Image (cartoon, rainbow, N blue to C red):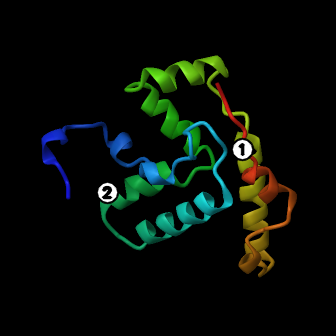
Amino acid sequence: MIDWAFAGMVPLVRAASLPRLLWPKDLLTAPSLTVWADRQAYIAAVAVHPSQAASYMRRWQTPQDVDIRTLFLESFFSKGIHVALARVGWELPYSKLVIQYAAEERQAGKSGNSGNRGRGASGSEAVDQTTRIG
């Protein structure tokens, strides 16, 4: 059930950001492998829609820095997230690990090894770590 009383106008990029259930567990923790896989499935589902809205969503949701993009935008509306990001210099400590994992994913896909999703590789272990901020 949706309570439309809370509906309102929001910037397109906020509407196109990842659904909250695909955010890291406490918003500033590296996403688990499960969340990473769920995000990929969600993005793949959105990718089949030819609409302009789906195109905007793909543009916002597919970059490797999707977490900082999402949290940066959310920081405009949440003092808690704003303060937490300011404390860490507006950079997530696990962002380099996510980029490394994404590179491994692309490489595994090119070599036909995508069924393993890079599990066991250093990048997958790194993304599965829970790096707590603030």
Label 1 residue SS? loop
- Left or right: residue 89 versus residue 96 is left
The answer to whether residue 94 of the structure is visible from this angle is yes
Q: Position of residue 34 (x, y in %)?
A: 62, 62
Quadrant in the picture for the N terminus? bottom left
Dot 2 alpha-carbon crowd within 10 angstroms: few under 14, some 14 to 19, many 20 or more: some
Label 2 residue SS? helix
- Left or right: residue 41 versus residue 8 is right
Of pointers 1 and 2, the one earlier in the residue sequence? 2
Separation of marks 1 and 2 at Cα, in angstroms = 33 Å
Q: Residue at x 79, y 68 (%)?
A: 119
Residue type at mark 2 is Ala
Q: Position of residue 116 (x, y in %)?
A: 76, 76
Residue type at mark 1 is Thr
Residue 106 sits in which quadrant?
Answer: bottom right
Q: Residue at x 43, y 32 (%)?
A: 74
**What is the number of the mark on residue 130?**
1
Circle 2 residue? 53
Q: Nearer the viewer, residue 104 or 130?
A: 130
Q: Given this view, does label 1 or label 2 mark the residue nearer the observer?
A: 1
Quadrant in the picture for the C terminus? top right
